[in-house]
Image (cartoon, helix red, strand yellow):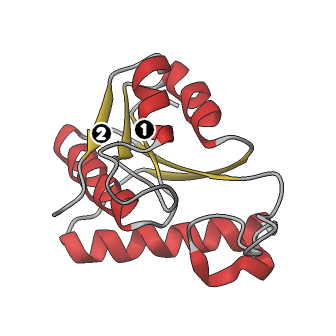
Amino acid sequence: MPGIIVGIDGSDHSRLALTWAMREAVSHRVPLTIVTVRPAQVRPATGIFWGIHDYAENGQDLEHTQRAVREFADRVANDIGQTVPDITVSVETGDAAEELVRASQDADMLVVGSRGGGGFAKLLMGSVSSQVTHHAACPVVVVPGSR
């Protein structure tokens, strides 16, 4: 996947990362691949599969997930008033950091938010952004959250 890869989970931090990545893709005229990673198992305490919260009951339905990610991307593109000419949505299942590191093998750049949907509010970087900055095969941009 040459071009820019952005990892999203539906959190506000991933929305900021997607916004940044879209602007860069337009500016440099490169393809953008949006990657979201679903855990293999539902979280037992909450019944939620991952960060785009509006369809936990359909979290394992690949087509439904792809549609939701595309709608998320369309909303972000509409908000920034730009159209990225070449967007691919990739829905993976597994560990988010591992899948993003794997995707980075052929990428020009990997973009992630500083924190995802879980964790502790006071952390500067979440576990996924920390892991990809240490192990990705391409340059990584960690987009900080707003304060």
Residue 11 appears in which quarter of the rendering?
bottom left
Q: Residues within 10 Å of mark 2 (few under 14, many from 20)?
A: many
Report the side of 6 relative to 62 (left or right).
left
Q: Quadrant of the C terminus?
A: bottom left
Report the side of 115 relative to 95 (left or right).
left
Q: Position of residue 72 (x, y in %)?
A: 46, 72
Q: Nearer the viewer, residue 120 or 47?
A: 120
Check the image and report above or below for 103 versus 5: above
Kindly identify which residue carries mark 2: 142
Q: Position of residue 119 (x, y in %)?
A: 49, 55
Report the residue at 24% width, 57% height from top: 145
Residue contact between numbered discs 1 and 2, judged by CB atoms under 8 Å: yes
Q: Nearer the viewer, residue 130 or 61?
A: 130
Residue 124 appears in which quarter of the rendering?
top left
Q: How many marks?
A: 2
Q: CA distance from mark 1 to mark 2?
A: 7 Å
Q: Earlier in the sequence, mark 1 or mark 2?
A: 1
Report the residue at 16% width, 44% height from top: 27
Q: Position of residue 37 (x, y in %)?
A: 64, 50
Q: Position of residue 121 (x, y in %)?
A: 36, 60
Report the residue at 29% width, 35% height from top: 141
Identify the secondary structure beneath mark 2.
strand
Check the image and report above or below for 47 versus 85: below
Kindly identify which residue carries mark 1: 129
Residue 31 appears in which quarter of the rendering?
top left
Identify the secondary structure beneath mark 1.
helix
Q: Residues within 10 Å of mark 1 (few under 14, many from 20)?
A: many
Dot 2 amino acid type = Val
Dot 1 amino acid type = Ser
Check the image and report above or below for 76 versus 123: below
